[in-house]
Image (cartoon, rainbow, N blue to C red):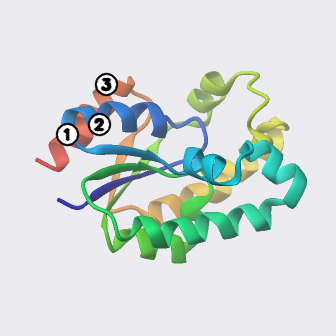
Amino acid sequence: MKNIILCGFMGAGKTVVGKELSKIMGFKFVDTDDLIEKEQGIAIKAIFAARGEEYFRSLEKELCKKLALTSNSVISTGGGMLVNSENADELRKSGKIVFLDASFDTIRERIGSNTNRPLFQDIEKARALYDERKAKYNAAADYVVSGDMSARKTALTIAEIFK
């Protein structure tokens, strides 16, 4: 079977839902941020600090090409990965994209004071980024599912789509 690719804003639940969904579906779980950190040997926050966002986005683009060759995986994408329509087109070759549409209030509550989110340090800027990206997630998505539910309920909802 093809891949199930999860997209959405940071804190939408892509990783937690993705792990749950992979168990339900019997698929491998892949977190793109984790893969990049392992490949680079440093945290994403450090990549942003040392090399900048443009460099990080180039790493994401290369990873999309590799992941497009896989199957039977639930892929949790980084919050900005599918803002680039080329990345969405590449990943769509291997599966369907599901947008976890969580409200900004839910995301803010989940992230709290997590300092590992370089683009969530300023709440007003984060809100503007959320508003800007939401339309891009919708454009990339084959399906839209609420990200405001529990991870289990969200995963079950997505699993129903792919039965």
Image quadrant in which you'd find residue 34? top right
> Which of the two labelled residues, at mark 1 and mark 2, occupies the earlier sequence position?
2
Name the residue that disc number 1 marks.
26
Q: Nearer the viewer, residue 19 or 163?
A: 19
Residue 71 x/y as whole percent: 27, 60
| SS state under label 1 | loop
* Amino acid at circle 3: Arg
Residue identifier under label 2: 21
Judged by depth in the image, the label closer to the viewer, 1 or 3, is 1
Q: Secondary structure at mark 3?
A: helix
Spatial CA span between label 3 and label 2: 8 Å
Q: Residue at x 39, y 27 (%)?
A: 149
Question: Disc number at residue 152?
Answer: 3
Is residue 24 positioned above or below 28 on the image? above
What residue sits 40% from the left and 51% below the top? 75
Query: For the point 73% across and 42% down, which residue is it?
Result: 43
Kind of residue at badge 1 = Gly
**Amino acid type of the residue that numbered disc 2 sits on in the rendered structure:** Leu
The foreground one among 65 and 81 is 65
What residue do we see at 78% from left, 43% from top?
A: 45
Marks 1 and 2: which is nearer the front? 1
Residue 79 % position (x, y): 60, 50
Q: Can residue 88 be seen in the rendering of this structure?
A: no
Location of residue 106 (image quadrant): top right
